[in-house]
Image: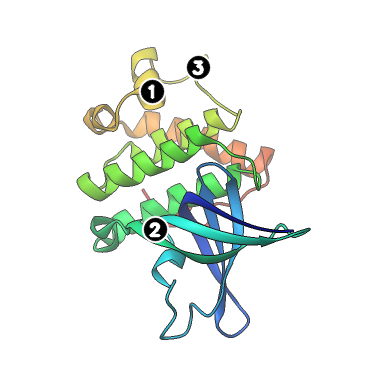
Amino acid sequence: MRMIFCDYGIVLQRRPLRENDRIVTVFTLEHGKLEVNFKSVRLARGKLRALSEAVTWGDYRFYLKKGSNFPVCTGGGTLCVFGGIRTDLERLYLAMHYCEVVNRLTPAQSPSPEKYDLLLGALQDLDANGCAFWLRRAFTLRALELAGFGFRETAAGPEAAFWEALHGGSWAEVRGLKDDEASAAFIDGLFSRFFGEHLGIDLRTLAFVR
């Protein structure tokens, strides 16, 4: 039995496969994180190249053979390439960091509409409004909470209203928070211990974001 299915998705990362193909990690709304084969997209005439680029939101059509967990993208349409992000290196690095955090905290084929909405909303905000001091930390705190590793109930650290704004406020509220290097260092310390010591994860994009 062969199956064709469609889903909305956000490209988290891509890597080359053979001479002309790509393996693309697509975080979909209904099917979760998928590793997808994009055939011939590295050729100049590759029709699905735009849909295989990192930090792209699209409507995808996939083909899956019986007994396989490795779908092939056969079509679709681009919903947004986030032009504001792509024309600003600082925004692009932060967007890639968002995608890496979600990728590292998301098991394959485990749908999480809440995490999908978090990533899409954060990218749309970043695209429209640019970078701000607390965005990275607020996004990571929310992603951790959705993954079941949250720090919302942490007893020590920043005062309650500020902590709640990072976890649950709108992106506009997060942008309005006053810069605070001491609180930022406290939160970064939580992340360092959690990702490094607890999960053994080295976030490669972290060196490029503030």
Q: Earlier in the sequence, mark 2 or mark 3?
A: 2
SS state under label 1: helix
Category of crowding for the residue at label 1, using alpha-carbon neighbours closer than 10 angstroms: few (below 14), some (14–19), many (at least 20): some
For label 1, the residue is 168
Q: Position of residue 41 (x, y in %)?
A: 48, 77
Q: Secondary structure at mark 2?
A: loop
Residue at image point 38% right, 15% down: 159
Residue extending farthest to the front is: 1
What residue is drawn where x is 33% and y is 36%?
Answer: 134
Question: Between 151 and 123, which is closer to the camera in this rendering?
Answer: 123
Q: Quadrant of residue 207?
A: bottom left
Residue 21 in the image: state x and y as whole percent.
56, 77
Residue 12 in the figure: left or right of residue 3: left
From the viewer's perspective, is the residue at label 1 or at label 2 nearer? Answer: 2
Q: Secondary structure at mark 3?
A: loop
| Nearest to the observer: residue 73 or residue 94 | 73
Q: Position of residue 98 (x, y in %)?
A: 44, 47
Instruction: Residue at 50%, 49% (x, y): give it.
Output: 7
- The answer to whether 124 is drawn above or below residue 1 in the figure is above
- The residue located at (39%, 58%) in the rendering is 56
Residue 156, numbered label: 3
Query: Which quadrant would residue 194 be assigned to in this image?
Result: top right
Left or right of residue 158: residue 193: right
Q: Quadrant of residue 89?
A: bottom left
Q: CA distance from mark 1 to mark 2?
A: 25 Å
Q: Amino acid at mark 1?
A: Gly
Looking at the image, is 88 positioned above or below residue 46?
A: above
User: Which residue is denoted by mark 2 in the rendering?
Assistant: 56
